[in-house]
Image (cartoon, rainbow, N blue to C red):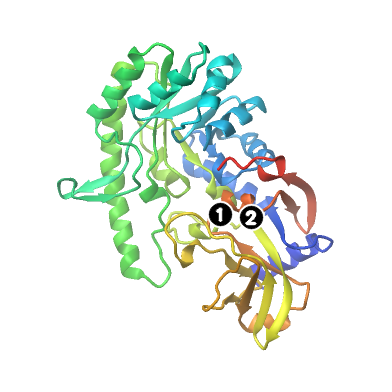
Amino acid sequence: MTARAADRARYDRATAQLDAPVAIVDLDAFDANADDLVRRAGGKPVRVASKSVRCRALLERTLAKDGFAGIMSFTLAESLWLARSGFDDVLLAYPSADRAAYAELAADPKLARAVTVMADDPAQLDLIDAAREGGREVVRVCLELDTSLRLLGGRVRVGARRSPLHSPAQIADMALTVARRPGFALVGIMAYEGHVAGVGDAVAGRPLRSRAIRLMQAAARRELAERRAAVVRAVRAVAPDLEFVNGGGTGSVQHTAAEDAVTEVAAGSGLYVPRLFDNYTSFRGRPAALFAQPVVRRPGVGVVTVLGGGYPASGAAGADRLPVPYLPEGLRYDPQEGAGEVQTPLVGSPADDLLIGDKVWFRHAKAGELCERFDTLHLVEGDRVTAAVPTYRGEGHTFL
């Protein structure tokens, strides 16, 4: 029996009394992935990215482990909810335009101490001030650095379009703006190198493309390390009490943590290890989060149909954004239908061994987005479900 076949047998036994659709997290794999992130961080704290987890119980489990410290959140409303729930170090990774939430933040000392907001434009500070509604609490601010690699005098850009602050001079000017403005405290810098951390460098069947990605990423790491160090020096000249410099992501933890200028790294997807993280040479994780769909039809030889399953991930549309049929091994989508909203045909010889009511296990393309489809995660240890915990959705929250 292969390791994957053994996992399938365990998951089927663990969920035998649960009807599909059902979502699970294999805690043995989850904990092993967490330990690997800490190892790769080389002694620097790992801030857990909540958008990749979206479950308070699993955020708490992660932060209880040595080597993890703080949350990187994705909306301001979520940040306030987490702070009210007892998380005392929440870094909002994206600028917000939520005026009502800013009013709450500026009026509550506990929230203002726990939450740090993101900024890269003075207009964002104007919005916060206009939303205060009399609240006088100092708002903690982190500046985001654009990490994109620019070549040929800027005519070629590699990396996500995020912050407009690219050079040390630009971010130093923004730091000075925050430092001089009453009601704000500059406490951190964030730089997420998504073109390194979030792009696999070993694309199956594409050796030339994989080599090109590795060359690009090596060049990007060198350029960013030099620029990030200069940025930190420039900002510390304005704000010598800067508390943290955050960088990285699951795919670049060890590289980013090696930079002297970085004080902490961020990661979240590496806990669940969705399918987009199968194509990395720098680490190997264990798939921890899966969902099962039930077989409801057997249309013919070599074909079964499962209920639902059309859960595409965000990003540029493509086959790599679809969940992948994982267990039993050897199933694939019908190219004429793909993953359907209500039903999904799957083809391959393993289909002939599946009966009505059997489970087919899938891996989502991205990590936390799975939790927008399920209100409960069943936690599996060995071949037993030992707990059932709510996702954000299960607690009544869909923040985005």
**Against 260, is 139 above or below?**
above
Q: Nearer the viewer, residue 283 or 60?
A: 60
- Amino acid found under the numbered disc labelled 1: Val
The quadrant holding residue 112 is top right
Q: Position of residue 198 (x, y in %)?
A: 43, 51
Q: Which residue is mark 1?
A: 273
**Against 335, is 126 above or below?**
above
- Amino acid found under the numbered disc labelled 2: Ala
Q: Position of residue 127 (x, y in %)?
A: 42, 24
Q: Which mark is residue 132?
A: none
Instruction: Name the residue located 60 percent from the left edge and 24 percent from the top edge.
Output: 88
Q: Secondary structure at mark 2?
A: strand
Residue contact at pointers 2 and 1, CB within 8 angstroms: yes
From mark 2 to mark 1, how far is it between C-alphas?
7 Å
Instruction: Name the residue located 26 percent from the left edge and 37 percent from the top edge.
Output: 226
Q: Which mark is residue 289?
A: 2
The quadrant holding residue 8 is bottom right
Q: Position of residue 208 (x, y in %)?
A: 31, 68
Q: Nearer the viewer, residue 397 or 26?
A: 397
Instruction: Name the residue located 75 percent from the left edge and 56 percent from the top edge.
Output: 382
Q: Secondary structure at mark 1?
A: loop
Q: Nearer the viewer, residue 350 or 95?
A: 95
Crowd band around label 1 with a 10 angstrom C-alpha radius: few (<14), some (14–19), many (20+): many
Q: Is residue 213 left or right of residue 316?
A: left
Q: Position of residue 116 (x, y in %)?
A: 49, 25
Identity of the residue furthest to the bottom in this view:
301
Q: Nearer the viewer, residue 239 or 301?
A: 301
The quadrant holding residue 119 is top left
